[in-house]
């Protein structure tokens, strides 16, 4: 197969001009690197739902034999493809080989996820190939199926009530910043993804929550708290109530629950915070 570039008429209609110009430059510069095999893109580019605030979620495919060279040169490569403002590795989201970058005066966010071809096969989505040096990317994607993200109900259920207890102990001690942090974690990790999946979306934190899961927005607002103990405690009770309702309506029948953990944690909430909860409801 000869070298392939995605034709311009197949790019999303919603792609902003600024993003398009930056992306064209990135493709041109990356395709000049002999140790790279291609470039693919995911995210809102694939669904044609881009706007001026969109990121560019790029997958930079390295020749396996040149991986160590490419890995060590990631920041130099990032700086060579456009007006780089900032770049750092993404250990905080568990992807140390990825660079999170900002480019240009318009501050366009670009994820440069460096990988070898086999890693592209395990992508949770079906990315669009922007450039393919020799057909490797098309071959990998045609012979594999995307592994779409789904809510892992058992993983959540095994942890949820311990998480609620932990958050309750922080609130009881008066550690409100930690309480608020963990409530946000629960919204991002548990209820947000469940609501998005129940609304037909791909569960991934709270990205585009208001557009995808708009019917749950009012319900979720009760979980967002300020630096106020009564509000935080009320949110904690609401987390438990909403999770149980979601579990009843959306969890698979194969889910193995832990009634004992649920009962003792709910009783703990009532024993410690019952008076707070009654004041705020």
Image (tube, rainbow, N blue to C red):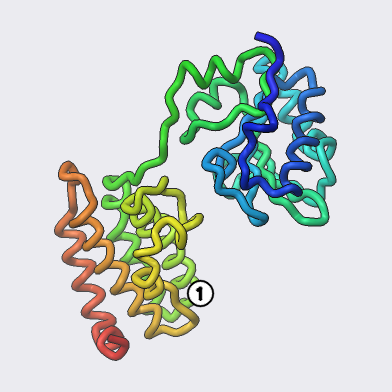
Query: Considering only vertical position in the picture, is 187 above or below 257?
Result: below
- For label 1, the residue is 177
| For residue 186, above or below residue 238 | above
Between 18 and 248, the one nearer to me in the picture: 18
Place of residue 18 in the rendered image (x, y in percent of width and height, measured from the top left):
76, 49
The quadrant in which residue 41 appears is top right
Q: Decide if residue 213 is on the left or right side of residue 57.
A: left
Q: Quadrant of the N terminus?
A: top right
Q: Position of residue 163 (x, y in %)?
A: 34, 61
Which quadrant would the C terminus be assigned to in this image?
bottom left
Indicate the position of residue 133 as horizontal and vertical percent values.
70, 17
Dividing the picture into quadrants, the one containing residue 71 is top right
State the residue at coordinates (55%, 38%).
46
Q: Does residue 264 appear left or right of residue 17 in this picture?
A: left
Q: Nearer the viewer, residue 6 or 192?
A: 6
Q: Secondary structure at mark 1?
A: helix
How many discs mark residues in the rendered view?
A: 1
Relative depth, front residue between 131 and 274: 131
What's the residue at 67%, 55% (across, down)?
52
Residue 168 appears in view: no
Which is nearer the eye, 121 or 156?
121
């Amino acid at each position: 197969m000869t070298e392939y570039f995605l034709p311009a008429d197949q790019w999303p209609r919603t792609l902003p001009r600024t993003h398009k110009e930056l992306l064209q430059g990135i493709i041109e510069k990356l395709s000049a690197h002999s140790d790279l095999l291609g470039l693919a893109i995911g995210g809102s580019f694939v669904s044609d739902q881009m706007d001026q605030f969109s990121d560019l979620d790029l997958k930079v495919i390295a020749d396996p034999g040149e991986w160590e060279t490419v890995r060590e040169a990631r920041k130099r490569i990032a700086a060579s493809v456009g007006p780089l403002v900032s770049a750092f590795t993404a250990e905080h989201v568990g992807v140390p080989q990825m660079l999170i970058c900002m480019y240009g005066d318009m501050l366009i966010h670009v994820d440069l996820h460096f990988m070898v071809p086999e890693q592209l096969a395990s992508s949770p989505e079906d990315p669009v190939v922007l450039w393919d040096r020799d057909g490797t990317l098309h071959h990998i994607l045609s012979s594999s199926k995307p592994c779409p993200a789904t809510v892992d109900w058992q993983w959540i259920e095994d942890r949820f009530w311990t998480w609620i207890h932990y958050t309750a102990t922080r609130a009881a001690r008066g550690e409100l910043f930690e309480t608020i942090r963990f409530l946000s974690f629960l919204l991002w990790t548990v209820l947000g993804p469940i609501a998005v999946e129940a609304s037909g979306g791909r569960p991934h934190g709270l990205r585009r929550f208001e557009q995808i899961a708009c019917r749950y927005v009012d319900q979720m607002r009760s979980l967002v708290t300020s630096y106020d103990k009564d509000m935080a405690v009320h949110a904690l009770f609401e987390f438990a109530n909403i999770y149980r309702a979601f579990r009843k309506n959306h969890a698979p029948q194969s889910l193995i629950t832990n009634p004992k953990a649920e009962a003792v944690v709910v009783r703990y909430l009532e024993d410690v915070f019952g008076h707070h909860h009654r004041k705020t409801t």
